[in-house]
Image (cartoon, rainbow, N blue to C red):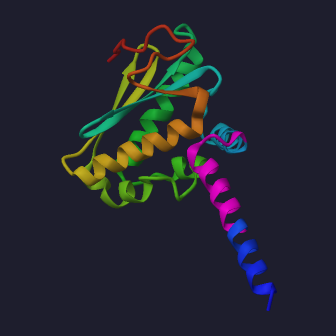
Amino acid sequence: MRSKPLIAVLVAAGLIAFGAIATIAASGDDPSRQQVVAERGARVMPFSLDATRHVFEATPEGGTQRVVAKDASDARNIQLIRRHLREEAAAFSRGDFADPAAIHGDDMPGLQALRAGYQDIDVRYRKLADGAEIAYATTKADLAAAVRAWFDAQLRDHAGDATTGDQPAADHTSHSGHVD
């Protein structure tokens, strides 16, 4: 009969340990998670993560994600960024979020809502002087929240290679130039 309290203590300890591991993984503070994301990203994104910066700027109606070259004279990476983001914008407009799922996982926050509600999201691609951006806008509050949750997940997963629009991008002088 004494084994029941011991079992209860062991089960409780196991649940606490599992919760701590889940919290670390969800917070993005897990270096192994960031390494896995970087490896998956290298298979999906044609440009160098080390030579680029991802910038996520949340807005009330959704947000804007930019990928810019850290070196504004890096014509090869800029070309690869533009091609990739143009293709991604077209895919997202069709509800195809396979590439982000391949990098971050199919259970990525916001992803299922974006897939289900893609027809209510205006997705626009734009070239920048040093890369490109995709803007997402919707009048549906739940979809705007899904875009922001999706951005937050990418910020955690990309860690040092990503920033928010209200923070200066390290190792990068400017990303505001527009090119048609």
Q: Toward which corner of the image does residue 128 lie, by quadrant? A: top left
The quadrant holding residue 61 is top left
- Please check the rendered image and state whether residue 117 is part of the magenta-colored stretch, yes or no: no
Q: Main secondary structure of the magenta part?
A: helix
Which region shows up in magenta? 14-31
Q: In which quadrant will I find the N terminus? A: bottom right
Q: Is residue 140 left or right of residue 77?
A: left
The foreground one among 53 and 95 is: 53
**13 w.r.t. 75: above or below:** below
Residue 79, image x and y in percent? 52, 22
Nearest the viewer among 80 and 107 is 107
Residue under the point 27% across and 54% down: 142
Q: Position of residue 130 (x, y in %)?
A: 46, 15
Q: Quadrant of residue 11?
A: bottom right
The reply to whether residue 106 is visible in this rendering is yes
In the rendered view, tell whether residue 97 sits above or below residue 159. below
Farthest front residue?
A: 2
Say which residue appears at 39% left-offset and 28% top-offset.
133
Q: Is there any visible trace of residue 135 in the rendered image?
A: no
Disc tally is 0
Q: For the point 23% across and 50% down, which residue is it? A: 141
What is the x, y in percent for residue 135?
32, 34
Q: Position of residue 2 (x, y in %)?
A: 81, 87
Quadrant holding the C terminus = top left
* Residue ID at (55%, 13%): 75
Residue in front for this viewpoint, 121 or 55: 55
